[in-house]
Amino acid sequence: MPFSSPPNPKVYAQQVYAVVAAIPRGRVMTYGQVAALIQPPPGIAPDTYVKLSPRWVGSAMAQAPDNVPWQRVINSQGRVSPRPGLGALAQRQLLEQEGIVFDEHDRVNLKRYGWRQEDTSSPQPSLL
């Protein structure tokens, strides 16, 4: 697959971190949703970008600085993506500490906990 990483990974990662930093506590976005908020780099066709960008976001998140709430980015199935070591468990625990509930299939309800950048407020989900 061409373009295994964005043409300028550092610039792309900074754009990813800016989007992720805006996700409120107790809310999540998917890798693809984060990517959709970032313009394709010059020279990358939009259809190619749609296919590759969620992985690019994942690569950036794997190297996120401590001040980026990395735990708030999950996969499109509403699950924590597997990763080496205890990373997936740590991510789930951090999300649960923020009030996010996982169902019996280890998924987050994206309709309930998902966040769109255009949301003007971020009320906590109803516990009822």
Image: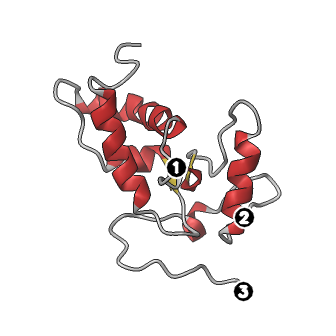
Which residue is drawn at the image coordinates 77% and 52% (left, top)? 106
Mark in front: 2 vs 1: 1
Q: Amino acid at mark 2?
A: Glu
The residue tagged 2 is 96
Q: Amino acid at mark 1?
A: Asp
The image shows residue 118 at horizontal and vertical percentages of 32, 68
Q: Are marks 2 and 1 in contact (CB under 8 Å)?
A: no
Query: Would residue 101 be found to the left or right of residue 31 on screen?
Result: right
Q: Are marks 2 and 3 in contact (CB under 8 Å)?
A: no
> Closer to the camera, 78 or 97?
97
Q: Quadrant of residue 100?
A: bottom right
Image height check: is 73 above or below 53?
below
Mark pair 2, 3: CA separation: 17 Å
Mark pair 2, 1: CA separation: 19 Å
Pointer 3 or 1: first along the chain? 1
Q: Quarter of the image containing the N terminus?
A: top left
